[in-house]
Amino acid sequence: MASIHSSLGARLRRIPKKRLREVGSQAFGTLLIIPGAILFLAPFIWMLSTSLKDARFTYVFPPQIIPNPFRWENYAQVFERVPFHLYGWNTVRMTALCLMGQMLTASMTAYGFARLRFPGRDVLFIILLSTMMLPSQVTMIPSFLIFRYLGWIDTFKPLIVPDWLGGSAFTVFLLRQFISTLPIEMDEAAKIEGCGFFGIYWRIILPLIKPALAAVAIFVFMWNWNDIYYSLIYLNTQKNWTLALGLNFLRRSSPMGPGVLEVELLMAGSIIVMMPCLLLFFFAQKYFIQGIVFTGVKG
């Protein structure tokens, strides 16, 4: 035993003190992160557990973490109660078109503000940023009147077309800051080779801002996938509803009466709606973090 302790002590003495401090700080950070992770995961664990419970056990105290029995039928019952396949197709189609429009037009707008020189550029950019301070409720009624005049109510056009006209101010700002970190010498070299402004944007700038585009894609996807505010305003016919509206309808569609809340079905529907967002963030978190970290860092 004494020989074991002596050999262990000799090994520890051979490890540099700096390395020991790094290991200690990492271990301390891990000990702090684990309780926080459990705390943040608790609502999701409760949601998943409730979605697999029988209705009799949803309100028992203390709560039943592991359902007994597991009711996978709750997920099938959600599709029987509400046409989630139709709402899912509407949501996928609307989100994909919004994503393509905002990625393309917002990146072009950001390229113009970052690289092109024209009178009033900085003033226009400040005006664009100032729109971020306007609450959406301020522009809700004027926007609704414009779309009603165009005959776009109860269609997907009010949800899709604005994303093809430059996107949101935040998206433009994020991409503009990222493009500003790229060396201007690349543009000048491309001009010498005969490349125009659009060629520089398409062949040089766009491939280099993939991390920022990935971050923007996650923001735009999650916003449009979970949007209920504008969908509730512009979509009236049930066949045009999105998943968020379908989930809200599920809350009020109990056969036992409008005042009865079937929590287990509502949680199962919530899991179905949020699963694409979780998968997207899980597989694209590397690019999301890169896009946020590198934005605004001058290189």
Image: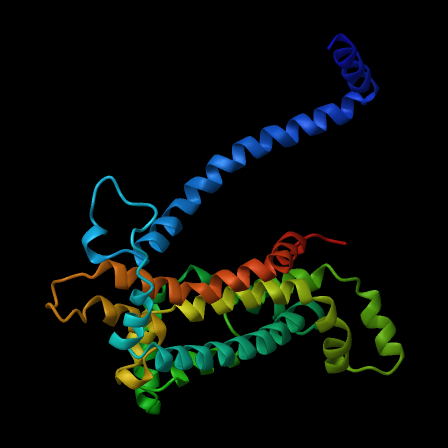
Q: Is residue 48 above or below residue 233?
A: above
Q: Which percent across, then down, holds residue 93?
A: 46, 82
Q: Which percent across, then down, holds residue 82?
A: 27, 76
Q: Is residue 184 above or below residue 47?
A: below
Location of the C terminus by quadrant is bottom right
The colour scheme applied to this rendered structure is rainbow
Report if residue 248 is visible in the image: yes
Quarter of the image holding residue 85? bottom left
Q: Is residue 28 above or below residue 297?
A: above
Q: Which percent across, then down, holds residue 283?
A: 59, 61
At 37% from the left edge and 55% from the top edge, which residue is drawn? 48
Report if residue 127 is visible in the image: no
Location of the N terminus by quadrant is top right
Quarter of the image holding residue 226? bottom left
Between 266 and 108, which is closer to the camera in this rendering? 266
Between 230 and 241, which is closer to the camera in this rendering? 241
User: Which residue sits furthest top?
Assistant: 2
Q: Which percent across, then down, holds residue 297?
A: 69, 52
Q: Is residue 282 above or below residue 124?
A: above
Is 1 displayed left or right of 63 in the figure? Answer: right
User: Which residue sits furthest front?
Assistant: 1
At 72% from the left edge and 82% from the top edge, which residue is drawn? 198
At 41% from the left edge and 77% from the top edge, which residue is drawn? 91
Between 53 and 164, which is closer to the camera in this rendering? 53
Quarter of the image holding residue 282? bottom right
